[in-house]
Amino acid sequence: AMLSARELYPRSYEITASIARLYRFLGQNSQAESELKSLTQESKPLEAKRVGYGGLANYYSYIGKYRDALQSIDKRMEVSWSAKDTALAAQDYVGKAWLLIDGWKDISNGWKEAEKSFPFRDKIKSQNYWGNISLLYVYHGDYAAADTVFKNVRWWQQALQSIGYSLRK
């Protein structure tokens, strides 16, 4: 069904990323990697490359290849900057921060990557970005800043309300 969807919507690159995730879950890692790499070919448009490199970063981190994951997120950032999309590039800094923290337990350099996104924060509307920033503030030890950001992230609030409701039952 997903292969048919890709045929119907060839410019919906997320379909290919979903196919790659399915292959990964099935343990067919070479097929997963191949699907994602197909999006990063020189002839592909910038959005395809961005999806492909982002998928590769996730894929490599999932299988424990953090150096490859970091290279992929760096390439994704290059694509974002070449498209002059500062908001997406800034979000990629946060993605790189998490790879450094999760993969190498390097909170210091992870924080430095996150800080690179700060000059562009006024352009970022993504709730995911802000949720990640609030968690990075916690890792950095700045709980007041984390709390300030945290209060403005709707999905965090919804999750906490849901947890609170479950605990009251």
Image: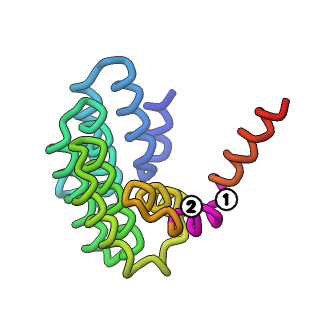
Q: Of the numbered discs in the image, which one, if any, rests on residue 154?
A: 1
Up/down of 36 relative to 80, above or below: above
Element assignment for label 1: helix
CB atoms at circles 1 and 2 under 8 Å apart?
A: yes
Element assignment for label 2: helix
Seen at 39% across and 32% down, the residue is: 21
Q: Of the numbered discs in the image, which one, if any, rests on residue 58?
A: none
Seen at 64% across and 64% down, the residue is: 151
Dot 2, how many residues are within 10 Å of its Cα: few (below 14), some (14-19), or many (20+)?
some
**Could you tell me what secondary structure mostly forms the magenta stretch?**
helix
In percent of width and height, residue 14 lies at: 44, 46
Q: Nearer the viewer, residue 113 or 16?
A: 113
Task: Specify the quadrant of the image occupied by residue 96.
Answer: bottom left
In percent of width and height, residue 33 lies at: 24, 34
Task: Specify the quadrant of the image occupied by residue 164.
Answer: top right
Q: Report the Cα–Cα distance between label 1 and label 2.
A: 7 Å
Q: Which residue is mark 2?
A: 127
Q: Nearer the viewer, residue 163 or 52?
A: 163
Task: Specify the quadrant of the image occupied by residue 78.
Answer: bottom left
